Amino acid sequence: MKLGLLTSGGDCPGLNAAIRAVVRTANNRFGYETVGIRNGWKGLHDGDIIPLPPKSVAGILARGGTILGTSRFNPVHDADTLAHCLENIALHRLDGIIVIGGDGSLSAAYELSKHGAKIIGVPKTIDNDIAGTDATFGFYTAVQTVTNAIDSLHATAESHHRIMIIETMGRNSGWIAVTAGITGGADLILVPERPFNWEKVCRQLVTRHETKRFSIVVVAEGAKPEDGDIVTMGDLDNFGRPRFGGIGYVVAREIEQRTGISTRVTVLGHVQRSGTPVAEDRLLATTMGVTAVEAASNGQFGNFIALRNGRYETVSLWEMKGKTRFVDDRMYDIAEIFFG
Ligand code: F6P
């Protein structure tokens, strides 16, 4: 069997661990040939395909980013693009493709599957928002990065008696914000799943400042007030999704004006996506990569690898398409115990 491998969408820690796992399992356990498709779906469209023998993945387990490169190229953007991709699958005689991607990339994989492409998906994203799996690799490293930032910011918040706003990534779901908010000891967490009320937020902070005199507020980039809109950069990505960013500044300005308490913002941005993967992400990426090749050997195309109740399963790509996995109430309830 000749297996193609690509990484698509935003990079995240653990991609190289997954690439290494796919290549080693395919070659060493099954005797398959592996080729790398560069820069996500764009490489499939352009025929930018390179040999990927086991020696090419030596020493990459602990490295962030992806040795294959990535992009937010949409292979089903229009009929021509789709046709090019299908032609290249035939031209390069790919018996299967392992696509390591987030919700946009795996939804596109589903569309290509419907046109006969033999694909197995491996979910990745720091956002942890892919429907059908309990976890995605990249998430745990992002949470560790945000936790470290919150730990650091406590000192300056306390010294200046300030409110520190920390804006995290996560698009339409608040997994990073809530999880790192809990592990970093946030005094308030604002997430997309729960539009917030300005008066309530300010009352909570003013009450806290009567005794504690500083606050740490974690704001997910997709959070929004009950009476307002999501803050975006104004442009769309190739999958038609808005680029988020900037809500932290809106929240800081409003809180400072309403409470009179000095407030500052830290937007963590892409530092959450970069850097060395933590052990949990390496394990998840490795296990998912191995399981994906096993699934290919069983001919289970049209599926993605999901972690469900501690077990790795193959689940139809159809199940995740167009859906978002949101923060559950229990998680937010736990976080709320520590507010104020
Ligand atoms: O989906 C992962 C993610 O990091 C989101 O949290 C964020 O909104 C987006 O990607 C940023 O994408 P880009 O790097 O293309 O600006």
Image: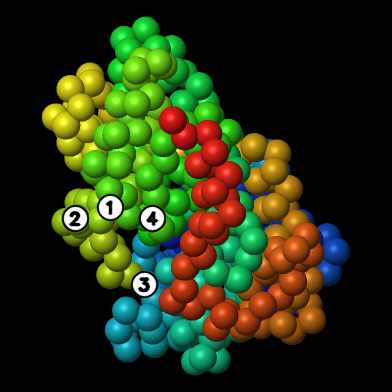
115 or 251, which lies in front?
Answer: 251
Task: Give how far across and how far down residue 35 sits, in percent.
Answer: 61, 65
Q: To which residue does mark 4 refer?
A: 194
What amino acid type is highlighted by mark number 1? Answer: Lys
> Badges 2 and 1: C-beta atoms under 8 Å apart?
yes
For the point 70% across and 39% down, which residue is it?
A: 279
Q: Earlier in the sequence, mark 4 or mark 1?
A: 4
- CA gap, disc 2 and disc 1: 6 Å
What amino acid type is highlighted by mark number 3? Answer: Asn
Task: Give how far across and how far down residue 231 sits, in percent.
Answer: 22, 51
- CA gap, disc 1 and disc 3: 28 Å
> Badges 3 and 2: C-beta atoms under 8 Å apart?
no
- CA gap, disc 2 and disc 4: 13 Å
According to the image, what is the colour scheme of the structure? rainbow
> Badges 1 and 3: C-beta atoms under 8 Å apart?
no
Q: To which residue does mark 2 refer?
A: 228
Q: To which residue does mark 1 refer?
A: 224
Residue at the extreme right of the image, as rendered: 29
> Badges 4 and 3: C-beta atoms under 8 Å apart?
no
Q: Secondary structure at mark 3?
A: loop
For the point 65% across and 46% down, which residue is it?
A: 281
State left or right for residue 101 relative to residue 241.
right
Is disc 4 surrounded by few (<14), some (14 to 19) or many (20+) residues within 10 Å? some
- Mark seen at residue 74: 3
What amino acid type is highlighted by mark number 2? Answer: Gly
Q: Tell me, yes or no, if residue 147 can be seen here.
A: no
Q: Secondary structure at mark 4?
A: loop
- CA gap, disc 3 and disc 2: 31 Å
- CA gap, disc 4 and disc 3: 31 Å
